[in-house]
Amino acid sequence: MRSRPSLRQWAVPAPRDAPPPFEHKRLLLGAPSPSRRQVAIVAGLSLGIAATVATVIGNPSHALLVSMGAFAAMYGTDRPYRHRAWLLSVVVSLLLGGVVFGALTERLAAGLGAVPGTVTAAGLVVIAGVTILAALGTFLASALQVGPPGGFFFALVASMGSLLSARGIAVGELAALTLLGGSTAMVLSLLPGLRAPHGPVAKRLRAADAALGRHLAAVDAGRATSRTRTDAAMALHAAWTAIDEAGMRDSATSRALHGMHERFAATLGVESSPTPAPTHPDGRLAEDIPLGSPRRRYLLRRSLHAGTLPTILATRVLVAAAVAGTAAYLLATGRPDWAVMSAILILHSGVDRLVGTYKALHRLIGTVVGLLVFTLVYAAHPHDYVLIVLLAVLQFLIELVIVRNYAVAVVLITTLVLLVMTGPGLDPGEVMRDRLIDTLIGVTVAVVVLWTVGQSLLRRALPGQLDRVEGAMTRLDGIVVATGPQSDAALEARRDLQLELIEAVRIADTAYRNAPADAGPHWQRHLATQDAGYGLLAACWSGPGHP
């Protein structure tokens, strides 16, 4: 690499293919998914144990409010335990902050003259606060690649905090119950690490081996596509990230993954040297890896552009939450936050219009059935430990089915939230009516926003991402010429280029499915950029300076 190569020199031809079409039956009825039994058990036990502790220490009437912190059990379920501990500590802190924020916002609104049950300008303060928090949480969760369930629960607990504060529950008590639920969830989420400390890493490694095997088989059969290449690259990237998060760079696992990556690089048309492990020029095992965790500052910076998926998601959530919340508040349904949450749930996790529309349908059907189930359960007057066990079972079932069938999950979520938030002596018929109206408002607003807001941003998403890929290639190219492919700067640039290539496929697929006429003119450039980018990365595995 003594002279500066052009992008064309690195290009490696690959079959051209469009993204697979959506399967409407799967979107409507659900699809098979990996087992979530362990995650579901942790989620159910977190709520049940924390609520039992709160009851035993003398707070049975508010014990179920520990659910605001127990939501932490849903985060980081596939991450290595060392990283999961850090992530859960952040999540619990954010849930605690969300509850306090919601409660203080309600106090501010009351101080400005808001009166429960009446429409005043001051009453919009809470809606504005939750809306801003929801948009910010959506952007950060998407930009930082937090993974499911994203930023939704931070907005949800803020909404719950404001409602509970309006009922006269002290901010300190809300914070203590949230902390109890979050701490319990954190401990239970980390306990499996005592039995299999590197279980999540081993799982990622098996997934990478399987994806690579499919790609190699396709290469041998002459039917490899850019999609089989991307699937293998994404699985390898996920495995490298897990190794980085687990602190296992200097390990047999790292060397095994290195061997897999060399076999992958060899399929890109560049002969890779068979070395046992990545080393720095001084001979020690690499302290960094090409495809580890991206820096959070880099992820935030790259997302702060019009047309990135985090920006589109946050824009839609901001508009929908503000409109739905204001509409429900003006109609005096009593719980405008329910309309806000209905809208956010549909919009916060993806920009695909068809997927979002099916999700809205699931939300509506699930809420109607969930209201009926809640009415039946509420009529039985469960209380104390019976109610705790019931909610723990509901939480377990939610986590068990939420990936497989969202509509069924919504039935369970609706029942659980209403049981937690509805006090004794209320008219269940009135609760059903108001919540149904709020849901209709939230779902309608979300679908309208989904199909109208952010379309110009979506049109700019693919060309903007291709510019970022080419910028990452140019940066890596210059670093390799100056320092070789194994310098610390080159390793970081290789990781960043891989991230941009993966993100480009995600954006290209989304753009093509939602607006093929707009994405079509950029498709050949997208495919050529993918070829050039992977060719450059493959060359880094065999060029001078690589052991």
Image: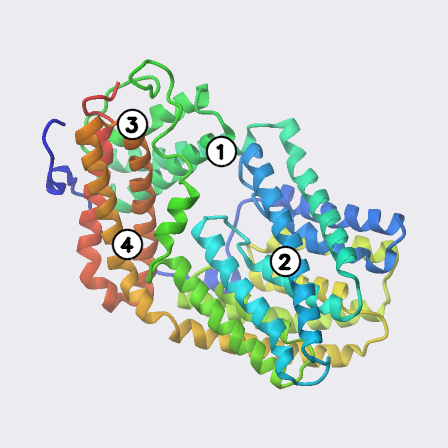
Q: Helix, strand or loop at disc 2?
A: helix
Report the Cα–Cα distance between label 4 and label 1: 26 Å
In front: label 4 or label 2: 2
Q: Helix, strand or loop at disc 3?
A: helix
- The residue lying at 59 percent from left, 27 percent from top is 197
Q: How packed is label 4: few (under 14 Cα within 10 Å), some, or many (20 or more)?
A: many
Which residue is tagged 1? 245
The amino acid marked with disc number 4 is Gln
Report the Cα–Cα distance between label 3 and label 2: 47 Å
Q: Is residue 529 above or below residue 322?
A: above
The amino acid marked with disc number 2 is Gly
In front: label 1 or label 3: 1
- Where is residue 307 shown, x and y percent of the image? 33, 62
Please identify the quarter of the rendering in which residue 119 is found: bottom right
Q: Helix, strand or loop at disc 1?
A: helix
The label shown at residue 263 is 3
In front: label 1 or label 2: 2
Report the Cα–Cα distance between label 4 and label 3: 28 Å
The answer to which of marks 4 and 1 sits earlier in the sequence is: 1
Q: Nearer the viewer, residue 367 or 342?
A: 342
Q: Quadrant of the C terminus?
A: top left
